[in-house]
Amino acid sequence: MSTTSVDPQHTCLLISSCDAYSDAWAPFFTLLNRYWPDCPFQTYLISNKQTVNVKGVHCIPTGQDAKWASNMLQALDVLPHAQILYFQEDYFLQKPVNNATIFRMLQFAHDSGAGYIRLTGAPDPDVPHDNPLGLGLLSPDLKFRVSLQASLWQRQTLLDLLVPGESGWDMEIAGTVRARQFKAPFFGVHRRKPIIDYYEATGILKGKWVPGALRLCRREGIEVDTSQREIHGEWPFIVKRFRNTPVVKACRTWFKRMRGKAA
């Protein structure tokens, strides 16, 4: 149990999903229970009409799918919690979650008045900040200041950003613009030091399985139903990993600097 003054009943774990992604539920919850078996928060799954038979998980059926933001508003309307720990159904955990770190983060959010804390680096914070968790500030002008990766939201901050009918992509782009006006600070972890560690941002991309996520499931002994959606080819992800290596990123930065001097 935490040594902080934070009450876990004030926070919930909310998994955003819909029936079209129900094939991800079994691997998601298997990995959640494997790597966070002592999760201290009430857990909710947003769905349309389907339910899931997982101990301790409560479904919030929204009826006919009405896009991401409208579904989220329906869910928040029935949840009493002041803080929302936000996941999506294809965030496949690959390392244990440390409750002591989670409670320190909750205490930091309380003490700092944070409106949002991103728990995986996508993108990294751009303003240094002195705190024991290694978090940085996300400046108002940072691209993807609002990201729907795993994150801790103050309920009111999330409500103030939501626009009915928006998709998740809309929220990240237009929500980032809206968030420039918010006074509450936004924080984030650095990419190499996630508080929640799951497979490369998402297990499903543009409606197709990401090959590496399926490999993770195979390593974990988890069968995945691949009959409902296609599987991406490997090559784009190989290129992406190569482009994101430190050497390549340093070279790109150097070329941009040289181009700027030559202009």
Image: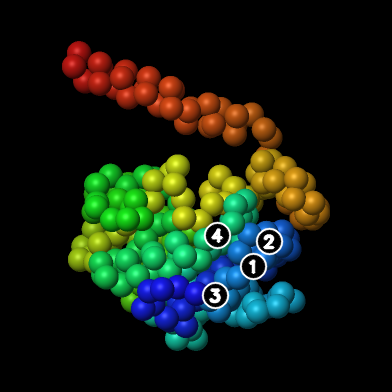
Helix, strand or loop at label 3? It is: loop
Helix, strand or loop at label 2? It is: helix
* Residue identifier under label 4: 97
Q: Is residue 94 left or right of residue 114?
A: right
Amino acid type of the residue that numbered disc 3 sits on in the rendered structure: Pro
* Residue identifier under label 1: 37
Residue drawn at the location 55% of the way across and 67% of the way down: 16
* Residue identifier under label 3: 40
Disc 3 versus disc 4: distance between alpha carbons?
11 Å
Disc 2 versus disc 1: distance between alpha carbons?
6 Å
Amino acid type of the residue that numbered disc 4 sits on in the rendered structure: Val
Q: Tell me if label 3 and label 1 are in contact, CB under 8 Å.
A: no
Residue drawn at the location 56% of the way across and 27% of the way down: 239
Helix, strand or loop at label 4? It is: loop
Image spot of residue 213 (x, y percent) = 67, 46
Image spot of residue 204 (x, y percent) = 63, 50
Q: In this view, does 184 lie to the left or right of 50?
A: left
- Residue 32, above or below 74: above
Residue 113 in view, yes or no: yes
Q: Residue 34 carries which label?
A: 2
Q: Between 34 and 62, which is closer to the camera in this rendering? A: 34
